[in-house]
Amino acid sequence: MFDIERWQEIFDTIRKNKLRTFLTGLSVASGIFILVILLGFGNGMQNGIAREFEQDAATSVWVWPGTTTKEYKGLNPGRRIELRNENYENSATMLADFIEYKSPRIFVRDVTVNYGKEALVYGIQGVSYQFQFIENAKMREGRFLNYQDEIGTAKVAIIGNKIKKDVFGDLDTPIGEFIDISGIPFKIIGVFWEQEEREEERIYIPITTAQRVFNGADRLNNLSYTLPPMENFDEAVAQAVNFKNELESYLKQVHIVAPDDTSGIFVWSAMEEAKRYYGLTGNIKIFFWFVGICTIVAGVVGVSNIMFIVVRERTREIGIRKALGAKPWSIVGMILQESIFVTTIAGFSGFIFSMGLLELVGPNVEVDYVVNPSVDFNIAISMVFVLIIAGALAGFFPAWRAAKVQVIEALKDE
Amino acid sequence: MIEIKELHKSYQMGSNSLHVLKGINFTAKEGELVAIMGSSGSGKSTLLNILGMLDVADSGEYYLDGVPIKDLNETKAAKYRNQFLGFVFQSFNLINYKSALENVALPLYYQKIGRKERQEKAMKYLEQVGLKEWATHLPSELSGGQKQRVAIARAMAAEPKVLLADEPTGALDSTTSYEVMDLIQKINDQGNTILVVTHEEDIAHMCKRIVHLKDGVIVEDKKIKQVRVTQNV
């Protein structure tokens, strides 16, 4: 191993067989390269899906009422459940420790909306001032609703960016303009934008105004909450599930819905959905591992093949060396040392190159569902060693056989 | 130098056994230049392979420089080959990616001689065969005669007890053949023992002794008057 003469002989051989060395090296390097890139993208995809969920208030929990399907405590099935203000207030007090932001929502229906002489066909929603954070709506102009608007039943409206473009395109700003909702003028005080254009086709007004002005009484269409962020994903999921269960059991109790009735009241948690996607990315990761392992197997087979051919090609040379007095082990050792040397250098070049590429390009990748592809250093490095060992083993057997071949036979080999 | 007694060798050819050597008795003293002649199938190459430890006999005794050659394993055979024997083949058998000098130096590598000394020695032997200027050339850049001279230099570089040449002129035209034989005669003049396998009469008569092989036995063994290629000695 540390025989300098041996190394000189090996470097000599490598130098004089550049193409063979290059091809062997290339196959090893590309094997490692493909593997690292694949694993990197598997990780990137997982990161990407996680990112996707971060965007839309990942911890939000929504409640909407349905119709009961089961008889319970003397009540017939088929009863429509209606949420009330007190449900919202009680839940907020009861679960105050778990709640980050909260807002009820009411859909204002059967109203006409006019701007001047123009009739508008946008949905109107009565919400609380914290709704902005639940929807992740970002203000472009003006401000969102505030607490004062809510207690003062202010006649103010927040419009989506799409409405601004469609209706108020001629104006510098829609702020200060009035829209008529069922004949009552509402002053526009803010414009928000969302990731999805569809969600920009909304007009928000204070919940109190919506209930009082439009005969809403104390009915609510939705309850929405966000939960405080947690250290890690599992804790966040646990928290969301816990919150959801508490909320659901409270609401079912007050509305006398059978605990096992799944359609009386719906509670939806984004976190739980996210967990499903995480499960999906888990599968994607398994898939990439599978592809990766197939790649490495292909790499091993490729390297083995090349070693086999290299030894085959050198049979005559081996015969000559033996005739000149080379011992079998010295021949096996020489071929192995050379092949390990080449695969090691090539393996690490492929490794460094692919890791470098991931490091450089990874953070700049801007494809949906792929964020910052990267690979665990240890995994990648063990792949390199697997290939080197496989190459050595694959080289050993043909080398050993070649060294055992009768000199005369080897010399006949053309 | 070489002493063999009752050497037998047969090959298994499918279900048939082919008895190639049927009891060979032969001795060669130091400094001899022996031609082994015979038609193809007479067993001359087999004999040379056994003498060169490239093949093992079924029975019989073989002494080389007083050392009994028996119970050979690969490692032992390799050691003896390196120590005792130099080979010259019909097809030269040079390593094609190594220069003439490196080819000549190769047996010295297996004698664990240092790189520098190897180069010097190899150069000395290349000079002896008149190819000093071609030291850095690859075998593919040399003519057939030059290749064989490199091969002879390589065989001599290890300073073997016996030089075994298997049809050394078989792949060469007659002019080049005579040049190679001239070289072999000169090496023999220095006191080296050389065995040449050939089927060419004129080549055989350039040796000092001719052994005729026929059907696996020696039918004739005679000393001859050597024909010198150059008459300047």
Image (cartoon, coloured by chain):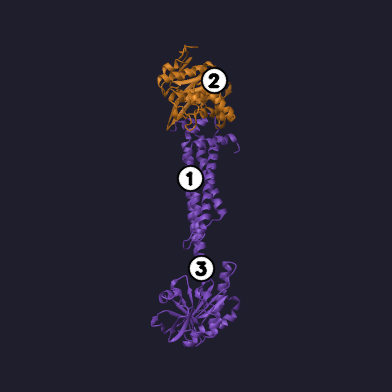
Q: How far apart are marks 3 and 2 (CA)?
A: 88 Å
Q: Are marks 1 and 3 on the same chain?
A: yes
- Chain A shade in the render: purple
Q: Residues within 10 Å of mark 2 (few under 14, many from 20)?
A: some
Q: Is residue B146 above or below residue A40?
A: above
- In the image, residue B153 lies at what x, y percent? 51, 24
Q: Is mark 2 on a helix, strand or loop?
A: strand
Q: Nearer the viewer, residue A388 or A225?
A: A225
Which residue type carries mark 2? Ile
- In the image, residue A362 lies at what x, y percent? 51, 57
Which residue type carries mark 3? Phe
- In the image, residue A325 lies at what x, y percent? 54, 29
Q: What element carries label 1?
A: helix
To which quarter of the image does residue B176 belong? Answer: top left
Q: Do labels 3 and 2 share a chain?
A: no
Q: Is residue A253 visible?
A: no
> Which mark lies nearer to you, 2 or 1?
1
Q: How crowded is mark 1: few (under 14 residues within 10 Å), some or many (20 or more)?
A: some
The residue indicated by pointer 2 is B2
Q: Is residue A199 above or below residue A350?
A: below
The chain displayed orange equals B
Q: Which of A234 and A199 is in front in this view?
A: A199
Q: Nearer the viewer, residue B204 or B228?
A: B228
The residue indicated by pointer 1 is A26
Q: Which chain is disc 1 placed on?
A: A
Q: Residues within 10 Å of mark 3 (few under 14, many from 20)?
A: some
The residue indicated by pointer 3 is A53
Q: Which chain is disc 2 placed on?
A: B
Q: Distance between the residues labelled 2 and 1?
A: 52 Å
